Image: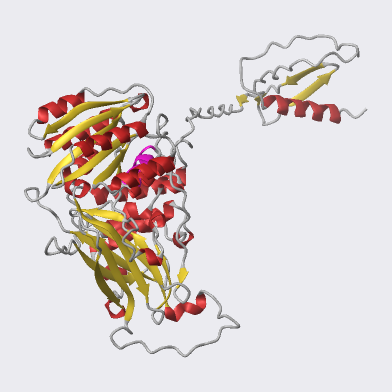
Amino acid sequence: MNKTLPAVAAIGLLGLAACSTPGPTPIIAERAAPEPAAMPAVAPVPPAPPVVPAPVADGRAKVVVGGSRMALQEHAAPMAYAPVRPAPPPAPYLVPQPEARDKFPDKESNKSVLVAEQPVSTFSVDVDTASYAFVRRMLADGRIPPLQAVRVEEMVNYFPYQYSTPAKASVPFAVTTEVMPSPWQQGNQLVHIALKGYDIKTAERPRANVVLLVDVSGSMGPRDRLPLLQQGFRLFAEQLRDDDMVSIVTYANGTAVALEPTSGKDKQKIIDVINNLHAAGGTAGGDGLQRAYAQAERNFDPKAVNRVILATDGDFNIGITDPKQLEKFIVDKRKSGIYLSVFGVGLGNLNDALIQRLTQSGNGNAAYIDTLLEARKALSQELGSTMFPIANDVKVQVEFNPAQVAAYRLVGYETRMLARQDFKDDKVDAGDMGAGHTVTAIYEITPAANAGKLVDPLRYEQKAQPKAAAPAKGDELCFVKVRYKLPGQSASKQIEHPVRAAAARKSLDAAPDDQRFAVAVAAFGQRLRGEQQVADYSYADIARLAEGARGADPDGYRAEFVKMVRMAESLGQAGQVSQR
């Protein structure tokens, strides 16, 4: 009988046993092999006991097999023990995260448009900043934000820029443009359009008649919700002039007037009411809006700025809850001359989609309050731009010259697009601009010389004789028109601005800091949205561009942005803390 096979089998058994978890040395008891019997019910099989590594002298171990007994026979040579491999560390336990119920507008990114087919682009301005602050909150928590939460124009417009300013309030903003090479697509150019609003000095601003509509439902209890808003509203109260009026309406299961109209002179009374707000109950937001607007109408001052400021973390689940009904209600109230601002707070229940619909319907603006510094920015530092409008229904229309431009793509503004005929229709609502506001829009354009790279010419197209462009217009890339209404007026006014090809910068580095920084922010927003146009432009590239364009940064906003870009890069490399 060949004794080699049993020996090999024994070695195989030892190898299998060695894979089990190390433990104390087992005591092996001899027992007779059982006779074959009927197959019993299957019981759980305990793990095989660990085997102590065999002592070895010359690197070999002799296997002795006899009947049902197996043992290792050692050589008499001096012995050494094989090293024991440590057990691998246990896998980290990830605490399950609650499913997020945040809601955002779901709009596809703008696509490239052929100038030959559609030479005109029209959109409403957007001065909201909610998207940027929400993205910052998500990245600080170690998570990449949902694609729908990223609105590129709101990220770009979050920052203050030192654009050219208008000389007088009768022309409420100045228009400036820059043309530069695209950093993410060789051969393309970027047309940067900037609006800078006239800034109203504190002594010159009109009186304010403000109703604070505060969500005090049970979900507002955490520190990043009602307590954070209370801190912000205290800063707001300190900015009031003596002739300003403030009311406070709260809503939970029902609504209540917490503070009747009170002069800004009585700041301590206002602050005391703010301090005494507590969170409990449901969310009758629709009823709260009705009562807040009724309060604003009852104390309406035609010489003041009349505004409702809504602060909430989520849905309206009591009273008027249908978004269309709420939107219709806001539209009707807009005609009364009452503006609307919405401040969102918290994570997990934020209905950003509803907030966007309400503010766009109600001559309003939206912000997201994630920190006390953001509350200070929105309710103290930028109180003028948040509270006091200098122009209503501001629309931008850009006509591209087909002799110079083959295609264009507007970066962002997906929720603000308008039809071409809406531009001159004064009944069509658009965004408002506050004192000192800046608005930035960036178009990526493909020069006419590169048209063949985009599409093939049509087989059956009848080629018409091209019309000769007027000498004064032939070198224009595009023509920018801005339409707006002064507050309290129903007829629009218009500003026009040509963009000339000869003014294009030869390199991106030659463009001013403000414009280059805005391009970096636009690139970051597009990358967070997963847009293919910037697929080859890395987070590291974006960080370098932003770092080189920081310029004067007294409040550290731009330095913070660079850190956000690097955080997103790190999360892409190491993975997120948790998925919601």
Residue 159 horizontal/vertical position (percent): 25, 52
Which residue is painted at 24% across and 49% down in the image? 557
Which residue is painted at 24% across and 54% down in the image? 433
As drawn, 453 above or below 545: below
Whether residue 267 is visible:
yes
Residue 278 horizontal/vertical position (percent): 28, 22
Which residue is painted at 31% across and 23% down in the image? 279
| Membership of 133 in magenta stretch | yes
Is 118 displayed left or right of 485 in the figure?
A: right
Q: Nearer the viewer, residue 412 or 46?
A: 412
Q: Nearer the viewer, residue 104 or 57?
A: 104
Secondary structure character of the magenta stretch overall = helix
Residue 390 horizontal/vertical position (percent): 19, 55
Is 225 displayed left or right of 54 in the figure?
A: left
Where residue 63 sits, quadrant-wise, is: top right
As drawn, 402 above or below 519: below
Where residue 139 sits, quadrant-wise, is: top left
Q: Nearer the viewer, residue 472 or 506?
A: 472
Which residue is painted at 82% across and 14% down in the image? 41
Q: Number of numbered discs present?
A: 0
Quarter of the figure that contains the N terminus: top right
As drawn, 55 above or below 498: above
| Membership of 89 in magenta stretch | no
Residue placed furthest toward the right: 1
Residue segment shown in magenta: 130-141
